[in-house]
Amino acid sequence: MINKDIFWVASGQILSAVAMFLTIKVWAVYLSPGQLGLLALLVGTASILTGIVGGPLLQSILVTYPSYHLDGDGRSFRYVSGVMLRNYVLSISFIVIIVGVPLSLFFKLKAIAPFFIAFMFMIDSYRIFEQRLFAASQRQKYNAITSGLDPVFRMIFVWFFLHHIKGDAYSAMAGSLFGAFIFACFMRFAFRLEAYPGDKTVSKAMRDRIKTELLKLAKPLFPSLILANITEMGNRYFIAALLGLQATGLFTVSYGFVKRPYGMLNHVGEIIFTPVLKSAIVRGDSERPVKIRRAWLAFIIGFSLVGAALFYLLREQLVLFFLSGKYARASDLLSGLALAVTLFNVANIFNWFSMTLGDSRAVLLNNIVGSAATVILTVALGIWMGLSGVVWALGIGYGVQLTASYFTYRKNLARHAGLKQEGGARAG
């Protein structure tokens, strides 16, 4: 069963990665490093919003849903969690538009920018919500199809807008938004979504139970995901302030080029192993979680190190083939970024282990430590060494986060084993 799921999820992620590489190629052909830097700030803001506002609930859904699915309460869970997410997203989108318009004018950006950001945030939150329900119910075929096709739609419309309308950051953002919207409509009507429609007649007791359980996991994740996004996405804003938009564009295209295949590995691991691990814990299976954890670590570490070697050996060829001559300096950054993201992927596994054991506060602690180290080092090493210093800062920061994640996971594992022994003694 797991091998079949891995095939589907990996297929979807490979298609997604190919589409993303083509999108990066389109960016590199039609946009200067300065315009790409501006696009990175616009797209990055929407991504950060999705991660900070929608992320805690979406991660909690992936961890929590399997138990409701097993009990036959999937429709109730879908309705309650969907309403919670919708209310959060609409509230934040309204604030983004109200605050964003005057800020855009102040920074001499087009007033349409906050509307792009808000609508992208809404569409992405809806899509990821449906994908999380597919994944949490182990319907990986549908999760793979939606994960793979969304970036294909975006890539097609990004190329169309840049080629036929105008070759600037706003056209690229508009194309991505239009493609995401068309795909969201397609997904809504083409698939029978998990537990759809939601059960609007859910009892107050069940509603309160679902809200309480989701918020218990989600609340510590709000600040932790703010820090995670500062670590992963925020450095482009520091680079823009310290080194300018051209350096931002160069770093963004380099980081995105490396992060896409590594993000694919990370996503496959999360989507496949998290529901299976959680279900095994819920059932009280003591052997299967150990095997799953070992397989997850071997999968991520093995493929990540192979990727790092390829990015080092083929760095110049990869830049010339996938990007363009304007981005030749990116070859100096690829291997260092690959090693840094490898550390992030392993740290993320230990965070998910703690999440499945019911401790999202550990994720907050780990992200505080990692984010603090990364931000301080990004500023210090960025001023001293330029973009190379930013890459070093990212690697050291992720290394610190990995160390913290490992020790908090071990603490949670010992606590979980102690609780099981105590429960067994009481039952005896």
Image (tube, rainbow, N blue to C red):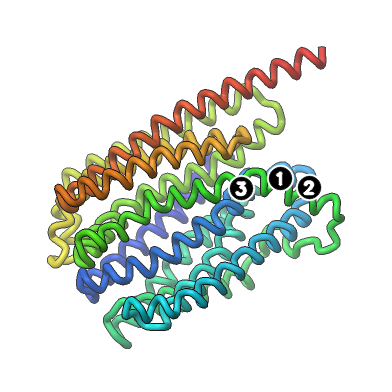
Dot 1 falls on a residue whose secondary structure is: helix
Quarter of the image for the N terminus: give it.
top right
Q: Residues within 10 Å of mark 1 (few under 14, many from 20)?
A: few
User: Which of these two is toward me, 74 or 124?
Assistant: 124
Q: Quadrant of residue 168?
A: bottom left
Secondary element under disc 2, as helix, strand or loop, is: helix
Q: Residue at x 45, y 53 (%)?
A: 11
Amino acid bearing label 1: Glu
Q: Is residue 195 left or right of residue 9?
A: right
Viewer-nearest of discs 1 and 3: 3
Label drawn at residue 219? 3
Q: Earlier in the sequence, mark 1 or mark 3?
A: 1
Farthest bottom residue in view: 165
Above or below — where is 128 with respect to 403? below
Residue at x 84% of width, y 57% of height: 202
Side of 263 relative to 386 (left or right): right
Looking at the image, residue 117 lies above or below residue 399: below
In the rendered image, which residue does mark 2 sit on? 209
Q: Earlier in the sequence, mark 3 or mark 2?
A: 2
Residue designated by label 1: 213
Q: Is residue 382 above or below residue 414?
A: below
**Would you say residue 211 is visible in this rendering?**
yes
Image location of residue 100, percent across then percent down: 45, 75
Number of numbered discs overlaid on the protein picture? 3
- Residue 322: in sight, yes or no? no
How packed mark 3 is, by other alpha carbons closer than 10 Å (few <14, some 14-19, many 20 or more), is: some
Q: CA distance from mark 3 to mark 2?
A: 15 Å
CA gap, disc 1 to disc 3? Answer: 10 Å
Mark sitting on residue 400: none
Residue type pointed to by label 2: Arg
Q: Give whichever of 423, 377 is nearer the camera.
A: 377
Q: Residue 315 placed where, x, y %?
A: 17, 50
